[in-house]
Amino acid sequence: MNLAGYTVSDAIPLPPKTDYAIGVIGCGGIVNYAHLPAYTAAGFSVLACYDQNPETAARTAREHDIPRVAASIDELLADPAIAIVDIAVTPWAQAGIAARAIAAGKHLLCQKPLADRYEDAVRVVALAAHAGVKLAVNQQMRWDAGIRVSRQLIEQGALGIPADCRVEVSIRTPWHMWPWMAESPRLEIMYHSIHYQDAMRHLFGDPDRVTSFHHRWPHQPETGETRTLTVFHYPDDRRVTIDVNHHNWSDDAYARFRFLGTEGIITGTLGLLYDYPTGRVDTLEYQPNREPRQWFPAQLSTRWIPDAFVGPMASLMEAIQSGGKPLTSGADNLGTLQTVFAAYRSAAEGRTITLTEIAGEGREHSGDHLGDG
Ligand SMILES: NC(=O)c1ccc[n+]([C@@H]2O[C@H](COP(=O)([O-])OP(=O)(O)OC[C@H]3O[C@@H](n4cnc5c(N)ncnc54)[C@H](O)[C@@H]3O)[C@@H](O)[C@H]2O)c1
């Protein structure tokens, strides 16, 4: 579509070859309501699935026409037909399973967070690089319509110099869908704002410093922080602000983005957050910095769930056949995790954290190897 003279599209491109056999490890909520519907719509082939709860795996296979239920992770990894392993387990189990999949020579799509300790993520990325397999992280917000079209506008110069970039989310989140998340001492940034932090890196590049403030809501049942305010600082005049509250009980819920540059402004809403996990299509409008003032609305049609979930898997497949890197490669994701761990350190220590401080600690671990998990 044409937006004020710029060409944009929220359609998600597929690579020429998409018939890789996928094996899914972990058959919980997100796999059933996002991964598998997206893969079915894209025509991807899921050959087998495994969950530590056999009934969960059997039900998932039945409901999504998956031909095989593996009796163990080893059985799934030993299947030579499976080229890609899609891991969607609880985060502390992921790094060990990823290490086993890498040892079996499989390409992988891992969940966000890649690991709940930075050094574990660094080790997994190093293992994949050493084994020559492709590792992508499921930071699918980059393919969400509002973010995807914003990226295309920014690449074509529609913002000029992006200067004041904001994500503002004030919603009521159904944390009860993930009892283990609700008990986690690190909640909002680790499991939710990690998407915004990754998407803002995608749009505006890596910050060099991060400041973050974390709060709870009075009497909240969740253990970790549910309100955060995070600022990305850059060496120039760019600034990104991510302001999130998950305890907005009112009917004034909002999830919006606003990117103001020298030559234009993009504003929009993140439809998924208005009614998770059903959601609605994002909105996006663009106004160029010229008279007469005029808003140009984009006609978007894809949703974060399930459509954007095609993106990371398609990008991984493209990387396998081209020999390139997935857009959300493990190595790239270390940059996102640096902003995540910097945010936690900033909030804990009441200071601004440079990303080199976090990255330096990770380098100490890049030569280690993970055992079976
Ligand atoms: N938008 C997103 O990208 C998004 C949204 C929600 C969740 N997630 C992530 O996806 C992952 C799973 O989340 P969920 O919502 O499906 O959680 P869930 O609790 O609904 O499901 C987790 C599943 O993993 C299985 N499991 C746990 N440990 C396992 C192991 N060692 N081996 C095999 N199976 C194991 C459990 O039995 C369960 O079926 C998490 O890492 C979460 O952060 C991502």
Image (cartoon, helix red, strand yellow):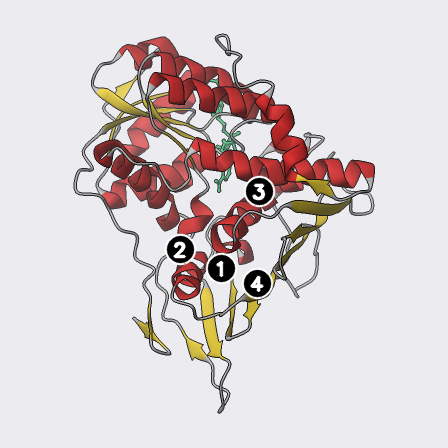
At numbered mark 2, what does the secondary structure look like: helix, strand or loop? loop
At numbered mark 4, what does the secondary structure look like: helix, strand or loop? strand
Residue 343 sits in which quadrant? top right
Which amino acid type is shown beneath numbered disc 3?
Answer: Ile
- For residue 351, side relative to residue 269 (left or right): right
Could you tell me how far apart the alpha carbons at marks 4 and 2 are, in whole angstroms? 15 Å
Q: Earlier in the sequence, mark 1 or mark 4?
A: 4
> Badge 1: how crowded within 10 Å, few (<14), some, or many (20+)?
many
Proximity of marks 1 and 2: CB atoms separated by less than 8 Å: yes
- The one of 209 and 137 positioned closer to us in this rendering: 209
Could you tell me how far apart the alpha carbons at marks 3 and 4 are, in whole angstroms? 16 Å
Q: Earlier in the sequence, mark 4 or mark 2?
A: 4
Could you tell me how far apart the alpha carbons at marks 1 and 3 are, in whole angstroms? 18 Å
Label 2 within 8 A of ligand 1 by Cβ: no
Residue indicated by mark 4: 256
Residue indicated by mark 2: 303
Q: Residue furthest front?
A: 235
| Image location of residue 96, percent across then percent down | 49, 15
Residue indicated by mark 1: 271
Q: Residue at x 50, y 75 (%)?
A: 263
Numbered tag placed on residue 194 in the rendering: 3
106 up-or-down from 192: above or below:
above
At numbered mark 1, what does the secondary structure look like: helix, strand or loop? helix
Which amino acid type is shown beneath numbered disc 4?
Answer: Arg
Q: Judge depth for marks 1 and 3 and give the one in front.
A: 3
Q: Residue at x 54, y 58 (%)?
A: 274
> Badge 4: how crowded within 10 Å, few (<14), some, or many (20+)?
many
Q: Is residue 176 visible?
A: no
